[in-house]
Amino acid sequence: MKDLGERIKEYRTSMKMTQADFACRLGVTGASVSAYENGTRLPSYDILIRIANILGVSTDSLRSGWGYTDSLLGRRGMGSVTLDVSRLTQEQRGILQRTADLFADYNRLSGGGVSGEKEEQKGS
């Protein structure tokens, strides 16, 4: 299971963001980001919230691997997608979540979905 630092690094790199860029947006030093990602230092709760906002994920997702990003996909581990929602309001984030849920429900009810999903289900 991945730890907090590994998840921070995974989300950051998926956004094509360097440690220096991330540190600048976060308002900390590059050494601090490195320490968070290597697990030699834990971010404060305030910093953890800023990290989550910048990466567009929930603090739950950072701490446990489950959360906003995973719920957008409907299930864990299927084609990771990370969205930068840091510049969206809470209302806009809610709209985005509800829209993703509607698409997931539509795909479930119509038998559609992720490319190759039907073939995987038939083979099971």
Image (tube, rainbow, N blue to C red):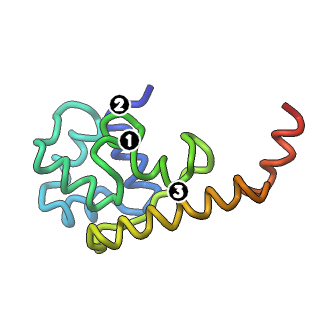
Q: Amino acid at mark 3?
A: Val
What is the distance, in whole Å, between disc 1 and disc 3 at their CAs? Answer: 13 Å
Residue 94 sits in which quadrant? Answer: bottom left
Tag 1 near tag 3, CB within 8 Å: no
Mark 2 against mark 3, which lies toward the viewer? 3
Q: Amino acid at mark 2?
A: Asp
Which element carries disc 1, helix, strand or loop?
A: helix
Question: How many numbered dots are placed on residues in this image?
Answer: 3
Residue 29 sits in which quadrant? Answer: bottom left
Q: Position of residue 4 (x, y in %)?
A: 31, 36
- Horizontal side of residue 119 vs 63, given as left or right: right
Residue at point 57%, 41% (across, down)? 77
- Horizontal side of residue 46 vs 54, given as left or right: left
* Residue underneath mark 2: 3
Residue in front for this viewpoint, 71 or 41: 71
Q: Please report whichever mark, 1 or 3, sits nearer to the chain's N-terminal start.
A: 1
Q: Residues within 10 Å of mark 1 (few under 14, many from 20)?
A: some
Q: Amino acid at mark 1?
A: Arg
